[in-house]
Amino acid sequence: MKSYPFGKFGNWFRAFLVKRVVRKAGKRINIYKGADFDTGKTITIGNNSDLGIDSWIRADLTIGDNVMMAIGCIIYSQYHCFDLLDRPMVEQGFYDAGPITIEDDVWIGARVTILAGVTIGTGSIIGAGSVVTKDVPRYSIVAGNPAKVIRYRKN
């Protein structure tokens, strides 16, 4: 999906192609230039949601409705095997460490990394450059490495 620029037409064309390869895609999705997601068979994208510019996805991923994703996000749930000491790690393959769920109305800042088994709760905001290793509570604002709750949107 990387090589179709062409402005709004490019967004439409990428979404058109993506809807044919992902598990499920909602209405009004945006797939921005450079979004890379392997085969797409394990990805669900909700209505009015997007994959940001140059985002990279290797995960069993569910994205809810109205999710905004900024540039350069990494969503990753595959880890290297390394238990066999008599074989180089590069020869031991990968394993999937668990699905990732991004609920509705989430804003993911630029260059965020989201790792395996995480659920990002409805209405949350993930600050730019954060590394999300644990579940994010609903309506929270998190940031940092590892990402921690800074405050909540609703008091």
Image: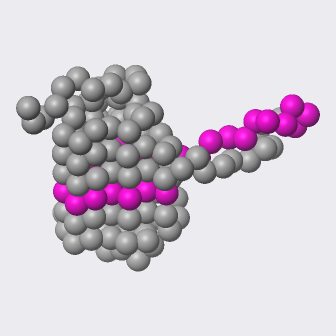
Image position of 135 with respect to 5: above or below:
above
Left or right of residue 43, residue 65 in this image:
left
Residue 69 drawn at (x, y percent): 27, 46
Residue 79 drawn at (x, y percent): 62, 42
Residue 99 drawn at (x, y percent): 49, 53
> What colour scheme does the image use?
one colour
Q: Tell me if residue 98 can be seen.
A: yes
Front residue (pair 15, 133): 133
Residue 94 included in the magenta stretch of the image: no
Front residue (pair 54, 27): 27
- Taking the view exactly as shown, the residue that stands out farthest to the front is 155
Give the tally of numbered discs.
0
Residue 87 drawn at (x, y percent): 87, 37
- Range covered by the magenta-colored residues: 60-87
Q: For residue 136, which quarter of the picture? A: top left
Residue 72 included in the magenta stretch of the image: yes
- Taking the view exactly as shown, the residue that stands out farthest to the right is 86
Image position of 82 with respect to 69: above or below:
above
Image position of 79 with respect to 100: above or below:
above
